[in-house]
Amino acid sequence: MFRPIESLIALTLLVTPVLSGCETPCNALADVICECEPNAAEEDVCKLRIDIASDRAVSDAENEMCSMRLETCTCEALENDDLAACGLAKPQE
């Protein structure tokens, strides 16, 4: 399938921090990424790890970026290693 979820979570936390507690575009993006796990148990672990690791507020710019990635982030993109589609690749300068 695609890279191990630990790598994806680490990249997510570096590139698109998630705010726990309320639904934001970045929360929704994290949910999309976790829903790509092969089974419910791994999906639950993914969501739990993100909840545990996300303890800072997300800026408006970050939420805007997450909103844009919600349009392109799919399980198929992740399976094809298109990490940028989900905001999991460092931005090109």
Image (spheres, rainbow, N blue to C red):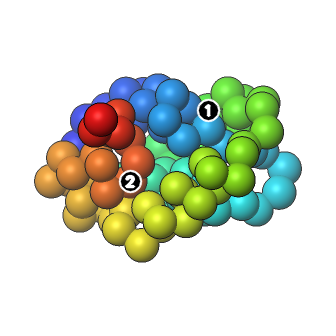
Residue projecting furthest to the left? 80
Residue at 49 percent across and 51 percent down: it is: 34
Mark 2 crowd level (few <14, some 14–19, many ≥20, 10 Å Cα): many
Q: Do residues under tags 2 and 1 come within 8 Å of each other at their CB atoms?
A: no
| 5 or 93, nearer to the observer | 93
In this picture, residue 40 sits left or right of residue 21: left
Q: Position of residue 81 (x, y in %)?
A: 18, 46
Regarding residue 41, the answer to whether it shows in the image is no
Mark 1 crowd level (few <14, some 14–19, many ≥20, 10 Å Cα): some
Amino acid beneath label 2 = Cys
Residue at 35 percent across and 39 percent down: it is: 91
Residue at 79 percent across and 39 percent down: it is: 57
Figure quadrant of residue 8 = top left
Q: Position of residue 44 (x, y in %)?
A: 59, 47
Q: Which residue is mark 1?
A: 49
Which of pointers 2 and 1 indicates the residue nearer the eye?
2
- Ranked by sequence position, the earlier of labels 2 and 1 is 1
Vertical placement of 1 versus 85: above or below?
above
Amino acid beneath label 1 = Arg
Q: Position of residue 75 (x, y in %)?
A: 31, 61
Check disc 1 and report its element: helix, strand or loop: helix
Q: Which mark is residue 63?
A: none
Q: Which residue is mark 2?
A: 86
